[in-house]
Amino acid sequence: MHHSQATYSIKDQRTCMWLTRYRTLTHQLQVMFILMLASNMAMFLGTKEANASVIPNYFTAANVNNATTAKTTSTNQILGYTRDWRLITRNEWGARPPKIITNFTIPASFVILHHSDRPGICRTMDACKVSMRSMQNFHMNSHSWTDIGYSFAVGGDGNVYEGRGYGVVGAHAPNYNSRSIGLLLIGNFMEEPPPAPMQQVAQNFIKYSMERGYLRDDYTLYGHRQVRSTKCPGDALFEVIKEWPHWQELN
Ligand SMILES: [Zn+2]
């Protein structure tokens, strides 16, 4: 009798504990939902008011700060941390699975910057998703690569698109593929540099990668043309990145 009472009591405690957890979770979900609604509305208003060259900055530091409870579950999932851009995951842009994944040990030592030449700049999330899929198809079908070549890509919509991700050997710059983040800015930047907000997102993403330990804090930034004979990342963008933190001449 005494024994079974004790058992019930533990069961009750457990039920109570789970109920509390359930209620807390429900509350957290409600808060997250409201935050998502608010940010979507901000995005909508921002898009409506802004002209095409202005990137909607819908994840402000303030509202992301209030929703930083998400934990990373893999190196490729970086949602939930303070930033003014959003990571669009492979799932979200409809990536094909990679044929092979080869890892390297983080942190990376280099950031190699690219432009896409073609496709040109994309200014909405839908357009940037199409660009990501077309580049991946081109790399996998025409080059027979295992995946899209780049680690990440910045869109003219102000978001960062997941390519191979952190710590995965890329196909964007020989000799640097297994020790760099290959960062693409989608567009042709021979004549004109990317819009200032797009440049800012690229720089913020690099800084974020460093702060999160994916990139050494003494990393070196190169334009693709510094490590290989190519016009990439375009004359105009190359001039601009010479002013960015950690850019160096290659001797
Ligand atoms: Zn390149």
Image (spheres, helix red, strand yellow):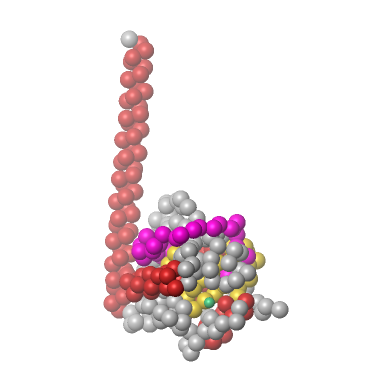
Report the residue that reaches farthest toward the top.
1
* Magenta-drawn stretch contains 91: yes
Total residue callouts: 0
Task: Please identify the dominant SS of the magenta region.
Answer: loop
User: Outermost residue toward the right?
Assistant: 251
Q: Is residue 239 depicted above or below 148 in this figure?
A: below
Q: Is residue 189 visible?
A: yes
Instruction: Indicate left or right for 45 with 226 as reference.
Output: left
- What is the quadrant of residue 159 in the picture? bottom left
Furthest residue to the bottom?
A: 191
Question: Residue 27 location, x and y as percent?
Answer: 31, 47
Depth order, front residue of 21/141: 141
Q: Is residue 194 above or below residue 100?
A: below
Which x, y percent locates residue 169?
A: 55, 62
Residue situated in front as seen by the camera: 179 or 221: 179
Check residue 227 for magenta coloring: no
Q: Quadrant of the N terminus?
A: top left
| Quadrant assignment for the C terminus | bottom right
Residue located 46% across and 65% down the image: 147
Q: Which residues are magenta?
A: 84-111
Residue 242 in view? no
Q: Nearer the viewer, residue 115 or 16?
A: 115
When the figure is inspected, residue 233 is found, relative to residue 71, above or below; the finding is below
Give the residue drawn at x 33%, y 15%: 5
